[in-house]
Amino acid sequence: MKNLFLRVKRNFDSNSNNFAPEYADLHLDVELSAPKGLDGVKEVSVRIYSASYRLMGVGCTEHDAEKTFRKACFDMANDDLWDAGLYRAYVYINGTPKWFCEVDLPVSSEYWTRKGLESMDGHPLEMFFADKLAMTNWWPKLHCGRFKEPFIRLLTEKLMIFSSEMEEKKADKVPHLLVTGEGENCGAKALASMILGGFITNDDVTKKYCLSLSEITTGTYGWKNMEKEVAKSKAVIVEVPDLDYNDHTVNIVNLMASMIRYDAFKDTTFVLHGTDRNIDMMMEKCILMQGLFSDRTTLRLSSDRSVGVKYEYDGEEDEFMKAVGELLDKENGCGLEETENRTGYCKAERKLEAMVGLQRLKDDMKEARMMAMFNKKRAEMCLQTDGEQRNHMLFLGNPGTGKTTVAKLVGQMYHSMGLLSKGHTVETNRSKLVGEYIGMTEKKTLDAIEEARGGVLFIDEAYTLISHESDTKDFGKEVLNALLTVLSEPEPDMIIILAGYEDKMAAMMKTNPGLKDRFPLTFHFDDYSAGELMEMACRTLEAGNYRLTDEAHRCLASLIEKVSAQRDEYFGNGRWVHNLINQGIIKSMARRVMSGSAAVRNIDISLLCDIQEADIIEAERNFLSLKTSRISSPRPIGFRA
């Protein structure tokens, strides 16, 4: 229909609309006119978007369908400035998009701008946007991600093509997609998870499942559990991280490629996303991934502002998008909807899973991370009333069970989840915190707290801060008093970890009734079994390019079994293994290899790598008896003024 017009004019009179919100003092007067009249009109609405397809204002009015519609006026109030420039206007009649036009607002606000409306019928792209995209929940997130107008238009074209093909072929799913970009903050994660995931599932978040290739290749959550989630999902968002492409990893990734290629899950669309570097590496190492995605099914984001064949993202870091992207990556069994950066599944989590033993700790740590992300998501959706996010921890266990190592990984993991701003770890103990005169202890402790802001403050042997003697000059309690300030903060951007023997830590907690409540998370570090100690020894030797002969392997296993059976509470666990190898076995080997001038002249690589049974026997005779006597009695702990 011709002779339909839209007139717009900016209005800076904040009193022009008594029904507008207080903050919305920027107005646009809009007038829709149909001089020849329209029949059967029950409702008229006008939606105005910026040049980058961001919704700027909506006007809606009801009409008596028995009467001819000729004119409607709207006052679109907004808290954003109606800048001079190009806008897109879409007119809906009875909820159906009918007409559109582009309006160029002049610099002056004194004059009306008048444009004729065009029918949607001759503009399929505009019709697709107004009908299928404009009013979805995920479309506004494109603006949050600061994607530029050229990319948004190209994205709209691709989505329209996919929809048309589905209608023509009567298919019920979108083709498998690949999203790649320059650098970690290019927006690929947000685009894949929130935008494409929302389009494929029609805004049904229960039909979306997010995972990382690292989870599949390490078996962290188990493919059987993932397979069930994949089978019932319409969109599976797969992160391609930086992987170590060994034979096992290549086989697993090729297996997934086969599933995608041959549509093993007929109702599921896979969306892979990652940096250019990580995607290229995957394609190079995994042959079945090659050719799986065409230019038509690939979206590439560029961090620069150049106009060209690259899809554009303006490169500015958006904390909201980063946080939501991390949450989405942790949804449905991968944590809850993080990260690294992120991480979703970050390198620190892989390192924790790769550590020998400690299964109870790993399970408890995974549950704690899931709860932390769950609470974070509830807080972001205004469901968390108290707003607290305390993750302070107690590490309980004997020496050498990995407490310090895990503390460093905690900082990295919680940083990748968006719960710590830096993720570093500051290690300290009583001797570094307690001063020699009044006021010095508090200063040292406060300095350590400031150094650890954004990360983890790890205090080993924390029970030594409390003296059970009647020494009023002991300053250890001042450390705990200084820590109470941080422990009381609802969102401290820091995790304080106190570590030590379980019984002594329990005694310390009893000295201050309020102290235990400040540490909501407790983790137990179990002693290593003889088999785990042997595995640890073999890993250490392999990492140092040493080889055990069969006789040496049996001798070492027997030695570890014997010492493990005689252990007491002061046994050094992993620390004992480390010392046995470096201070005992390697030294014994060095003496054997380097003894005699003839041996030095005729030395070869096997002599420098192969550990003999004699080396183990000599280490037991010369090193082990001394070390065992040292660790079998408790180390004295002194308290000084």
Image (cartoon, helix red, strand yellow):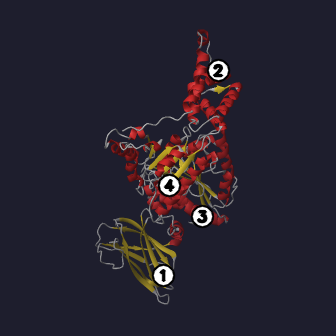
Which mark sits nearer the N-terminus, 4 or 3? 3
Nearest to viewer (mark 2 / mark 1): 2
* Residue 167, x across and y down, in percent: 63, 66
Depth check, front residue: 70 or 438 = 438
Are the residues at dot 3 and dot 2 in contact (C-beta closer than 8 Å)? no
Which mark sits nearer the N-terminus, 3 or 1? 1
* Residue 97, x across and y down, in percent: 51, 74
Q: Which mark is residue 606?
A: 2
* Residue 28, x across and y down, in percent: 35, 73
Depth check, front residue: 162 or 435 = 435
Q: What residue would you read off at disc 4? A: 520
Secondary structure beneath disc 3? helix
**Vertical placement of 570 versus 544: above or below?**
below
The residues tagged by marks 2 and 1 sit, at their Cα atoms, a distance apart of 87 Å
- Mark 3 closeness class: few <14, some 14–19, many ≥20 residues within 10 Å: few
Nearest to viewer (mark 4 / mark 1): 4
Secondary structure beneath disc 1? strand
Q: What residue would you read off at disc 3? A: 206
Residue in the picture at 45% in, 66% down: 385
